[in-house]
Image (cartoon, rainbow, N blue to C red):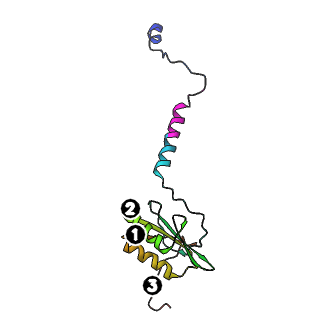
Amino acid sequence: MNNSYANSFKSKRQTFFGRPDLTPMVDVLFLLLIFFMLSSSFVQVSGIKVELPRVGARGSLGIEKFVITVCHSDSGARIFFNDKEASWEVLKQGLAEVSNFSASGTVIIRADQRVAFGTVARIMALAEKANVAAFIVTMPAEEKQEVRFDRHER
C-alpha cells in the first residue's frame, strides 16, 4: 500500500480537552423535578392532635381537601371542618357544599380513637344524607398481620 493512500482515510477528529457542558443534564433534572412535583399528591394534615386507631388496611386516595376532624376533649368531642371548629349545623352546611361543588364528592374523617363511635356514626350518616362519600383515616398496623375470621375464635 501506498503511504498517501493511508493518509487519505485518516480521521479528522481531534481530542477535546476541557469541561463537558452540564446544561443539558441540568435541564433534564429540572424537568424531572417538575414532573414529580406535578404528578404527586400532597394532602396536608392539620395541626389538630388526634390519636388515630391502628388497622391492617393500607391505601391512599388522591382527593380534594375536605377533612372532618373529631378530637377528644374533657367536655366531649370537638368537631372541625377543614381546620375550623364547627357545630353540627355548620357541618351539615359544609357537607351540602361538598356535595354541590366538589368534583369527587368525598370527605376524609380523622377521628381520635377515644371519641365515641356514635359521634363518628352520626357524621357518616350526615355525609350519606348529603350524598358524600366519607373515608375514615387510620394508621397502618405496625406489624403486618393477616385478618382471619374463625367461628371458634372469641
Marks 2 and 3 sit apart, C-alpha to C-alpha, by 34 Å
Q: Are marks 1 and 2 in contact (CB under 8 Å)?
A: yes
Q: Residue furthest front?
A: 89
Please tell me the numbered disc located at residue 120: none
Number of marks in the rendered image: 3
When the figure is inspected, residue 142 is found, relative to residue 5, above or below; the finding is below
Magenta: predominant secondary structure element?
A: helix
- Which of these two is toward me, 4 or 130? 130
Which residue shows up at 59% across the image and 71% down it?
50
| SS of the residue under disc 2 | loop
Q: Position of residue 59 (x, y in %)?
A: 47, 66
- Residue 132, located in which quarter of the rendered image? bottom left
Q: Which span is picked out in magenta?
A: 18-30
Q: Amino acid at mark 1?
A: Ala
Please tell me the numbered disc located at residue 104: 2
Mark 1 = which residue?
Answer: 133
User: Is-magenta flag for residue 21?
Assistant: yes
Task: Indicate which disc, 1 or 2, sits on the residue closer to the N terminus.
Answer: 2
**Image quadrant where one finds the N terminus:** top left
Q: Position of residue 118 (x, y in %)?
A: 49, 82
Q: Amino acid at mark 3?
A: Phe
- Which of these two is toward me, 14 or 21? 21
Marks 3 and 1 sit apart, C-alpha to C-alpha, by 27 Å
Which residue shows up at 41% across the image and 65% down it?
106
Mark 3 = which residue?
Answer: 149
Task: Indicate which disc, 3 or 1, sits on the residue closer to the N terminus.
Answer: 1
Q: Residues within 10 Å of mark 3 (few under 14, many from 20)?
A: few
